[in-house]
Amino acid sequence: MLRFLLRRLLLTVPVLFGLTALVFAIARLLPGDPVALAAGPNASAAEIAAYAKEFGLDRPLLTQYFDYLGNLLRGDFGMSLYTRRPVVEDLVAYLPATLELVFAAMALAMAVGIPLGLWAGVRRDAWPDVVSRTLALGAISMPRFFLGLLLQLAFAMALGWLPLGGRYPITIDPPALVTGFLTVDALLAGDFEAFATACRHLVMPALAMSLSPLATLMRMMRASTIEVLQQDYVLTERALGLPQRLIVLKYVARNAISATLTVTGLYFGWLLGGTVLVETVFDWPGLGLYATKSVVTQDFMPVIGVTLVIGTLFVAANLVVDLLYGWVDPKVRQG
């Protein structure tokens, strides 16, 4: 297992290095003048030049990149042109909100999608299978931002059950900051009213983000379950008279879930990069909303920082999935 882990860690180094080069080049070569925009419409040419010199943007692009790479190794993501705040401070402030949303969406997708996929595979071509496939097709086809708007219209505006947006009421003090996850911090503080409030704000954006991975995990688990059920060892267990529940839960589920784990890791990274629309619709103060505001102002340093953080988390998520895959299937560790 140690060799397996070291091999995966070594493979992440060139990936992250290539990501930094690609993102930095794209952000700096985009049309427009972010320095002039940040300096203001009434800034003179001398003021714009001084502004560019202050942020080191008057030097050659290659020099800027290596300076940025050196600073990045020290944990410095640069300075925002628009707010003049260190980007790392904004990333630390906004990242927990995005992670809390993504974790909630993935937990919901896995908790519902995997059991439904297992059930549909066991009841192949029966009514549960037909209904689950129909719902999965509709969930995959529904754009997340449109689903978010429908949820707002139904549960916030029509029924009034849930708040329209935001992460926590601005008129109420949130629980003491410990992890940055409001639900976890509320539980750590023993404030169950704050926990309920945080969950009420979290449920609609998490649901809007979870339907697509839920449907994909369900379809993947169904296909894997059908394949495993046709294996010789399952047929042998049935011939020996073992209970159906034991066969499904002990033997079929563990072997069928291995392929689903890979999709789970990919969807985790996809959700991290796809929070922009959902966070914008629900005014969720995470990396997606932060990146949207930075793009509008052509503030490229936050955009680069957000992209690198999401890319790093995506690589880390797939590393965890590889380790889980190796634990589930010992043949992978030996490869």
Image (cartoon, grey):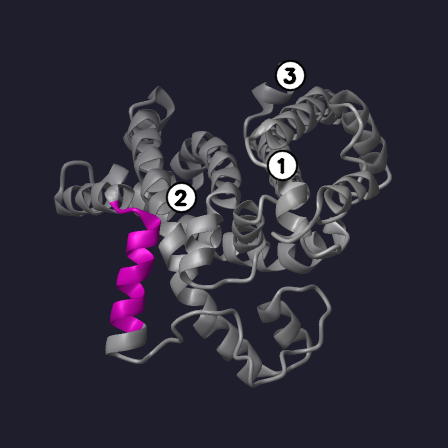
Label ID, residue 249:
2
Q: Which residues are magenta?
A: 142-155
Disc on the earlier residue, 1 or 3: 1
User: Percent from the top left, x then y, of residue 130?
Assistant: 15, 42
Check if residue 154 falls in the magenta segment: yes
In this orientation, which residue lies closer to the viewer: 62 or 44? 44
Mark 1 residue type: Val
Q: CA distance from mark 3 to mark 2?
A: 26 Å
- Which class describes the residues within 10 Å of circle 2: few (<14), some (14-19), or many (20+)? few
Which quadrant of the figure has residue 59?
top right
Q: Are marks 3 and 2 in contact (CB under 8 Å)?
A: no
* Residue carrying label 3: 334
Residue 22 appears in view: yes
**SS of the residue at dot 2?**
helix
Above or below, 295 against 325 in this view is below
* Residue carrying label 1: 320
**SS of the residue at dot 3?**
loop
Dominant SS of magenta comes to: helix
User: Percent from the top left, x then y, of residue 255?
Assistant: 44, 31
In this orientation, which residue lies closer to the viewer: 131 or 306? 306
Label ID, residue 253:
none
- Please identify the quadrant where the N terminus is shown: top right
